[in-house]
Image (spheres, rainbow, N blue to C red):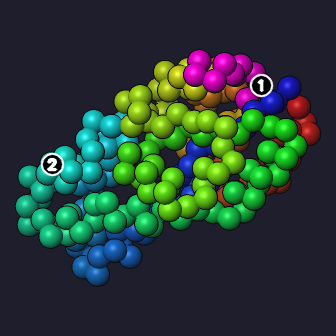
């Protein structure tokens, strides 16, 4: 029986589309493409999520690698967090689940800058009972240890948790640990997908 629903943030509770952010932020197509490659294709952003870099050290590393884009990099970090926008329908779903008595948790790959921005500037965390954020534990999904951190910290049982993520490999790891799971491909469909899973169980 599911007693808790565990949400990812990116593309589940808030938008996270790096290519679109880069294109929106920079007018220069080459700069947008090059900086996307630098941050997201190289694994550098995974290290940022993991807490191996903060915003300041990330900028330093990026400038060392692409000094020709120093001005763009300094402008991008941490302003990019403003482009991570809460998804109203998902936040409403959380409120409905909370009223029905479910525990609400977050398990997210997220850097500290983004967490602080979302906490201070949005209502994303208003109805949350707890969460594990990758920068805090220096582990990112789909490493099983981050799921185990959540279970241990809050005394949860995996078989009583429904896990929702936009990345298939993250859901597959959750399933292997005993969670129920939903691969969220469109947040607009999430309410119906959650309803089907909860009623089926």
Q: Which residues are magenta?
A: 152-161
Q: In the picture provided, is 142 more to the left or to the right than 22?
A: right
- Confirm whether residue 168 shows in the render: no
Residue at 24% over, 79% down: 28
**Image quarter for residue 153?**
top right
Residue 104 image offset from top left, x and y in percent: 70, 39
- Do tag 2 and tag 1 residues touch (Cβ < 8 Å)? no
Q: Residue 37, image x and y in percent?
A: 27, 57
Eyeballing the image, is 78 above or below 167? below
Q: Position of residue 137 (x, y in %)?
A: 41, 28
Disc 1 target residue:
160
Magenta-drawn stretch contains 201: no
In the picture of the structure, the residue carrying the numbered disc 2 is 61
Query: What residue sits 34% from the left and 74% below the top?
Result: 25
Looking at the image, residue 24 sits to the left or right of residue 180; the answer is: left
**Position in image of residue 55 (x %, y %):** 27, 51
């Amino acid at each position: 029986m599911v007693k808790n629903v565990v949400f990812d943030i990116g593309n589940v509770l808030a938008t996270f589309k790096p290519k679109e952010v880069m294109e929106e932020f920079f007018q220069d197509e080459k700069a947008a493409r090059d900086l996307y490659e630098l941050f997201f294709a190289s694994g550098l952003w995974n290290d940022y999520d993991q807490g191996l870099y903060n915003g300041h050290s990330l900028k330093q590393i990026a400038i060392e690698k692409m000094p020709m884009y120093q001005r763009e990099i300094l402008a991008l970090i941490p302003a990019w967090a403003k482009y991570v926008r809460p998804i109203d329908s998902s936040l409403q779903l959380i409120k409905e689940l909370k009223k029905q008595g479910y525990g609400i948790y977050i398990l997210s790959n997220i850097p500290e800058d983004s967490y602080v921005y979302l906490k201070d500037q949005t209502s994303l965390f208003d109805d949350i009972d707890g969460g594990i954020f990758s920068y805090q534990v220096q582990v990112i999904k789909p490493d099983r240890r981050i799921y185990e951190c959540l279970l241990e910290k809050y005394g949860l049982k995996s078989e009583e948790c429904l896990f929702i993520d936009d990345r298939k490999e993250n859901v597959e790891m959750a399933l292997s640990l005993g969670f129920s799971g939903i691969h969220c491909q469109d947040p607009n469909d999430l309410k119906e997908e959650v309803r089907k899973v909860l009623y089926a169980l």
